[in-house]
Image (cartoon, helix red, strand yellow):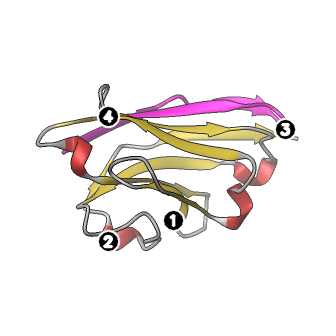
Amino acid sequence: VQLQAYGGGLVQAGASLRLSCVASGSSPNTYTMAWFRQAPGKEREFVAGISWRGGSTNYVDSAKGRFTIARDNAKNTVYLQMNSLKPEDTAVYYCAAAHNFVNEFTTTPKEYFYWGQGTEVTVSS
């Protein structure tokens, strides 16, 4: 499975961005998908996950109420809608895929076998 993430940018605090991750390869729609982020000098952090059918989602506490993960399996695409962005959301955002026996509540990066290249999000105050 190959993942291509895009949609990052420089925005002011309070703005919104939508990240997209397009998957290709062998049966991408059968994978659990997630977004992680990594800020400079920090470890990679789970942000949101979604089940392969899209019926179940999971979020890190700091993203709850502001971010929404969704997927369109017909387009092999996973989205992360980010609203009310804060400077502390600044990071490189990565999409990741795991075999579907890994559920969307799995937050450990090593459980996700496939990774996109990352898209940078910068939120100014």
Tag of residue 44: 1
Q: Which mark is residue 111?
A: 2
Location of mark 4 (residue)? 73
In the rendered structure, which disc, 3 or 2, sits on the residue that comes first in sequence?
A: 3
Label 2, label 4: how many angstroms apart (C-alpha)? Answer: 22 Å
Q: Secondary structure at mark 1?
A: loop
Q: Marks 1 and 2, how far apart in space?
A: 13 Å
Q: Earlier in the sequence, mark 4 or mark 3?
A: 3
Highlighted range, magenta:
1-22
User: Is 23 covered by the magenta stretch?
Assistant: no
Is the residue marked by circle 3 packed among few (<14), some (14-19), or many (20+) residues within 10 Å? some
**Mark 4 residue type:** Asn
Q: Is residue 118 above or below residue 103?
A: above
Q: What separation in Å lies between label 4 and label 3 (alpha carbons)? A: 31 Å
Prevailing secondary structure class for the magenta stretch in the rendered image = strand
- Left/right placement of residue 4 relative to residue 13 reads left
Residue depicted at 31% across the width and 69% down the height? 102
